[in-house]
Every structure is written in structure tokens, then in C-alpha cells.
Image: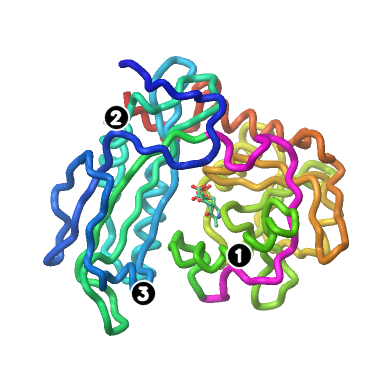
Amino acid sequence: MQKKDIDWGNLGFGYIKTDKRYVSNYRDGAWDEGVLTDDDKVVISECAGVLQYSQSVFEGLKAYTTEQGQIVTFRPDLNAERMMDSAARLEMPPFPKERFIDAVVQTVRANAAYVPPYGTGATLYIRPYMFGSNPVIGVKPADEYQFRIFTTPVGPYFKGGAKPLTICVSDFDRAAPHGTGHIKAGLNYAMSLHAIVSAHKAGFDENMYLDAGTRTKVEETGGANFLFVTKDKHVVTPKSASILPSITRRSLLYVAEHYLGLPVEEREVYFDEVKDFAECGLCGTAAVISPVGKIVDHGHEILLPSGMDHMGPVTQQLYDTLTGIQMGRIEAPEGWIHVID
Ligand code: PLP
Ligand code: COI
């Protein structure tokens, strides 16, 4: 198969239209069989539930070319399960797990020419999403839904790749206690846009959100969970019911414990403790692990000892092991790698 003529090494995190996308519609209480289509346009009612009351959920995962030349995805079963949880919270019908995985495989296979070659640093980002598609004017769930998957080749989420980021403690809240912070709903991202634009205008790469209830505990950023490393090399990650259960973070904790032999702690992390950590990283499908060098809290700067030039040593080990597993250089735990071709 002839790969597309793309400058893989210089891709940012953007949208490039690929050849095929997957579409399935939910009507009269059932999902249809689903198809791959060339048509990248969505035609829905002006009164569609998603347009009026933001009834939409999504996922994000990647396809990789391994060192052996296979195309694989990473733990798509967990994205399928999380999307079912997200849908349930917004009163949307679940898209069945086996069908989700099959739809991912079909879409990636149909766009194999866009899966970046091994060693380029780029990957194929896969975006499954679902939205209420029929007219809804009283506040209630839609009766009809569309599930779609498109793909786009991407490079690093943050400009500068692995250069440590400077982030700020946000004055805005991302998620309420007992709200929707733990699901991947578009509405969580809409409400973060003003906060991220404000952070960028002030010269920061990202926001650190604190818990909305007490504003004393670290939650997450707009698009990634936090990992911290203590001076005695414990890997610590915030536990909260209002953050997204990141698949990358769950995988990294396993890697820390079982591949690197490091103690791991998933617990509440008070902002007051952050000054004592040795390393900090943002983890997610898009972010992979992006190191944080500086955290600014209303003018007060916390400089991580790992500095502004490179990742801290434990962050680097975690990064190398996780990407090694994804790219076929390191043996994966049972069930983590889903081979497509
Ligand atoms: N937190 C938020 C708010 C996100 O949008 C994402 C991205 O999906 C993550 C965390 C990381 O989750 P995952 O590792 O499953 O991609
Ligand atoms: C992902 O990592 O897949 C996300 O959805 C994060 C988003 C901010 C791009």
C-alpha cells in the first residue's frame, strides 16, 4: 500500500481529511449496521439535540505503525467502555463495545495510507463521536443519534514536542462535584475554551484546574491527567470523581509498577504538595506524556527540579516504556495491543 505524500515529521495536532469515515445511525431504538463513506459532511436538522443542548460525547485513540510494520491500536476496548459510560450519563444509547472496536478497525484499515510510518513520530488519531441528531426543543434527550469515526494524522499535541511546558493555576473550574467531569462530553470542552484562551493570552501552555468544591486539590488540565514523581521516585496521580479516567494514565501507572518497579499512589493531591514534587507530566492520548517545567499560581512560580530543558528521568522512562509498547519495541501486557493489519 502506497502511503500518502505527507511531511510526517512536521505534522502538528490538526485535522487533515482522510479518505473514509464510519457512520451508524440510531433510529426506532436500534443502531443500523453502519457503513464506511467518502462523505465528510454531516447533515442534520437545525433543531438537532446536539445543536440545541450539546448532547454529544466523543473518544480519542491512536493507530501506530510498529517497528515490525504492523498497524495497531492501543486498548480500544477501554475507549469503547468509556464511551458507553459517557453516553449513559447524557441519556444516549450505548454504542456496543464489539461494534465500536470493529468500527475503529474498519476506519483505520480504510485509511491505512494515512497511518504514519514507523519512526516518524507521527500517529493516526482516531476520533469516535456520537450526537443527538433529531429535532429537540423541550429539554430532553434526542430519540435519534449518529455515531461516527474519522481519522487524521497528527504530530505532537503541544508545539515544541517534548519541551517542558509552563502551566498556570486556573481561576475557572472545569467540572463540578457530581457533574460531568468524569465523562468525555463535548460540553466539558466548550466550557474550558475561555479558560484556555485566557491562559494562552497570558503566555501559558495549559491550565491546572483545582477541585471546584474546595480549590485545594489538583484535578487535571483541559485535555490530560497529571502524573507527579516524588523525590524518592513514587509516581503519584490525583484521584477524583470529577476528572476523566485517562487510559494513558491508567496504563502508565501499570508501567511504573510492573515494568519500572516504582511505587504508585492514586490519591488526592493537595496543591500545597506540588512544590515538593521532583517531576510533573501531563498524560493523555494526544499529550502522551508532556513534561511540565513550571507551574504558576497567581504570580507565584513553582519550578520543577527537572527544569525547562528536558523531561525528568522518571517521566522519560515512563515515556520510553509506554511508546515502546505502543510501537512494538517492548512486549505489551496481554490485551493492550489490538492488531489491525
Ligand atoms: N483528561 C481529559 C480532560 C482529556 O480530554 C483526555 C483526553 O482524552 C485525558 C484526560 C486523557 O485521557 P486518555 O489517556 O484516555 O486519552
Ligand atoms: C485526547 O487525548 O484524545 C483528547 O481527546 C484530548 C483533546 C484535548 C485533544
Q: Quadrant of the C terminus?
A: top left
| Badge 3 residue CB within 8 Å of ligand 1 | no
- Describe the element under mark 3 as helix, strand or loop: helix
How far apart, in angstroms, are the residues tagged by discs 1 and 2? Answer: 37 Å
Q: Alpha-carbon neighbours of circle 2 within 10 Å: few (<14), some, or many (≥20)? A: some
Residue sitting at x 71%, y 37%: 315
Magenta-drawn segment: 155-178
Task: Report which residue position mark 1 lands on.
Answer: 240
Reply above or below: 56 against 205. Answer: below
Q: Position of residue 323 (x, y in %)?
A: 57, 30
Amino acid at pointer 1 = Ser
Q: Which residue sits furthest bottom? A: 138
Is residue 162 highlighted in magenta?
Answer: yes
Magenta stretch: dominant secondary structure: loop
Residue sitting at x 33%, y 33%: 108
| Residue closest to the eye, 208 or 72 | 208
Task: Report which residue position mark 2 lands on.
Answer: 109
| Residue closest to the eye, 174 or 217 | 174
Task: Report which residue position mark 3 lands on.
Answer: 53
Amino acid at pointer 2 = Arg
Frontmost of labels 1 and 2 is: 2
Mark 1 / mark 2, whichever is N-terminal: 2
Q: Alpha-carbon neighbours of circle 3 within 10 Å: few (<14), some, or many (≥20)? A: some
Amino acid at pointer 3 = Tyr
| Badge 1 residue CB within 8 Å of ligand 1 | no
Residue sitting at x 74%, y 59%: 202
Mark 1 / mark 3, whichever is N-terminal: 3
